[in-house]
Image: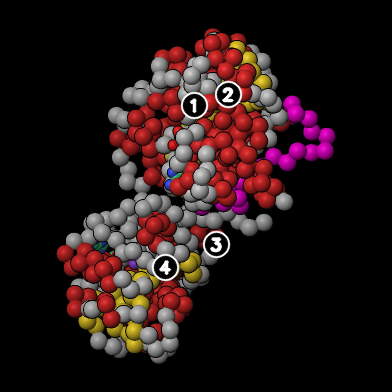
Amino acid sequence: MTAPELVLTSSEMRQADRATIENGIPGIELMRRAGRAVADSAEKLAAPGDRIIVAAGPGQNGGDGFIAAALLFDRGYQVSLGLLGTPDRLAGDAAEAAKGWYGKVERVEDLSFHGADLIIDALFGTGLARDLEGAARLAVERMNASGRPILAVDLPSGIDGDSGAVRGVAVKATRTVTFAVRKPCHLLMPGRAYCGPVEVADIGIGGDTLEAKGGTLFANHATLWTHALPRPGLSSHKYERGHTLVASGGATRTGAARLAARAALRIGSGLVTVASPPEALGVNAAHLTAIMLRGCDGPEGLNTMLQDQRFNSLVLGPALGIHAGTRAMVAVAVHARRSLVLDADALTSFEGLATELHGAFRHAPSVLTPHDGEFNRLFKGHPDLVDPASKIERVRRAAAYTGAVVVLKGADTVIAAPDGRAAINENGTPYLATAGSGDTLCGLIAGLMAQGVPAFEAACAGVWIHAEAGASFGPGLIAEDLAELVPGVLRDLLR
Ligand SMILES: NC(=O)C1=CN([C@@H]2O[C@H](COP(=O)(O)OP(=O)(O)OC[C@H]3O[C@@H](n4cnc5c(N)ncnc54)[C@H](OP(=O)(O)O)[C@@H]3O)[C@@H](O)[C@H]2O)[C@@H](O)CC1
Ligand SMILES: Nc1ncnc2c1ncn2[C@@H]1O[C@H](COP(=O)(O)OP(=O)(O)O)[C@@H](O)[C@H]1O
Ligand SMILES: [K+]
């Protein structure tokens, strides 16, 4: 089976780099391999003899640029190179690499990018330390304005490697070639949108080293969780496949719960029940067939229902109402120690009250699924959770704080577990931004947990399957479609 795809932060990558050097591959050799990968990648974007302009920065990213420039010159291209700063500032391997470039070292300010068939952006990589200003900023703006194809070395200059944020201004790359593994900025927004297709070049940093220095952050693909997906055996009966309970809102707010319930059933929960306030029983009954329905009056009603141990997975939040009653229902669910997914109103009801959720979810598999707005409302007053620039860091901290797996939704949904594991999702589509889409996601995750899938794997699988279903449909997608598309996605996964 293919291993999960590791993603390393800038500092983890530096450690892997150092360990590789200590194990006997000199830094300059790693840089030569990186530069060769850049040259090889450039050839895919250029025609023989094309004019290639390299913009090199003052660090090792610039060093990669010098190596690539020399190789491309040897391969018959017309190559010019401009440096940001002066050659005497180059140090270490970058200074060594610069010695292999026999052409003129121009000032990056003097380069005319309009004349290029291809630009190689080797200004900054993982060492970017602050916003771009002055000559650096101007160089990036001029590259972008040229309209010429740009190959980014490691990452587009101006993008923060760990957060994917734009530090003032950033190169809009046509393609990016990175080394050993992808970095967070290749998957997180807005960085992902600046990279173009990302090529990962093997420069001889071993899998064991990458695993040892990273090992907790992944791209969210099936390789991460497919082993945990339920596969019913020949003699399985529905009671072995779990019973998901979804709490419904009042008479005019019932659709969200039914969307979640339908998704839980489609993902394989053996039974699904909607727990409905008495006044909404009629509306719910008119719309449910395979899904069961029970009257449930607030927190006490939920408490009574949960005496039945067969309800092993719960969804609370979609259209439940923002008030103390919802908080009380969450308390009942937490006390009952069932698998739990909390979304929407169940999260917003704790606005400003996040301390009540501190460590609350440690004792049972639990998943919180906020979007940015819900996340910021829930954790406002906790700058350590809302302020970090990196979405991965925010989600990891929220997971550690609450004891739940946290799914921070968006175009770059990040899933993190209290133990530090995290995954970034990238197979979504903007068509998923439609009313009720999040409710469906809750149901998928709860339905997987009902079948015994651990919380982190259930959250990662739920997010991926949800996104895959949405992407397979495309324009015109509405939330009702999503659950119906799940069987097709599952069929491919379980094949
Ligand atoms: N890891 C690996 O396995 C391998 C890594 N390799 C390559 O190394 C790259 C990382 O190299 P790196 O650490 O030297 O950092 P890099 O991105 O060149 O930038 C640092 C320089 O920029 C400067 N600077 C920073 N911000 C600035 C700003 N806003 N405006 C202006 N200046 C600014 C900063 O100067 P200072 O902050 O000191 O003023 C420093 O001089 C990596 O991306 C990959 O391409 C490969 O060669 C081989 C294998
Ligand atoms: N641009 C996008 N690309 C990919 N997925 C997206 C995008 N925008 C939203 N989504 C996904 O759509 C879903 C929307 O959920 P949510 O915001 O809770 O909506 P609702 O409350 O209407 O159900 C989330 O799973 C989110 O990750
Ligand atoms: K770069």
Q: CA distance from mark 4 to mark 2?
A: 45 Å
Q: Give x and y (percent) for residue 228.
A: 65, 42
**Label 2 CA crowd tier, 10 Å (few <14, some 14–19, many 20+):** many
Q: Mark 2 or 3, which is nearer the eye?
A: 2
Contact check, label 2 and label 1, Cβ < 8 Å:
yes
Q: CA distance from mark 1 to mark 3?
A: 42 Å
Q: CA distance from mark 2 to mark 3?
A: 43 Å
Q: Earlier in the sequence, mark 4 or mark 3?
A: 4
Instruction: Kindly indicate the quadrant of the structure image that contains residue 118.
Output: bottom left
Q: Earlier in the sequence, mark 4 or mark 1?
A: 4
Q: Give x and y (percent) for residue 206.
A: 53, 65
Q: Which residue is mark 4?
A: 175
Q: Which residue is mark 3?
A: 207
Q: Mark 1 or 3, which is nearer the eye?
A: 1
Q: Amino acid at mark 3?
A: Gly
Magenta span includes 48: no
Asked if the beta carbon under badge 2 is closer than 8 A to the nearest atom of ligand 2, the reply is no
Say above or below: 104 vs 464: below
Start-end of magenta stretch = 219-240
Q: Which residue is mark 2?
A: 246
**Label 3 CA crowd tier, 10 Å (few <14, some 14–19, many 20+):** few
Say above or below: 469 vs 210: above
**Callout 3: SS:** helix
In the displayed orientation, state which residue is furthest to the left. 134
The one of 316 and 208 positioned closer to us in this rendering: 316
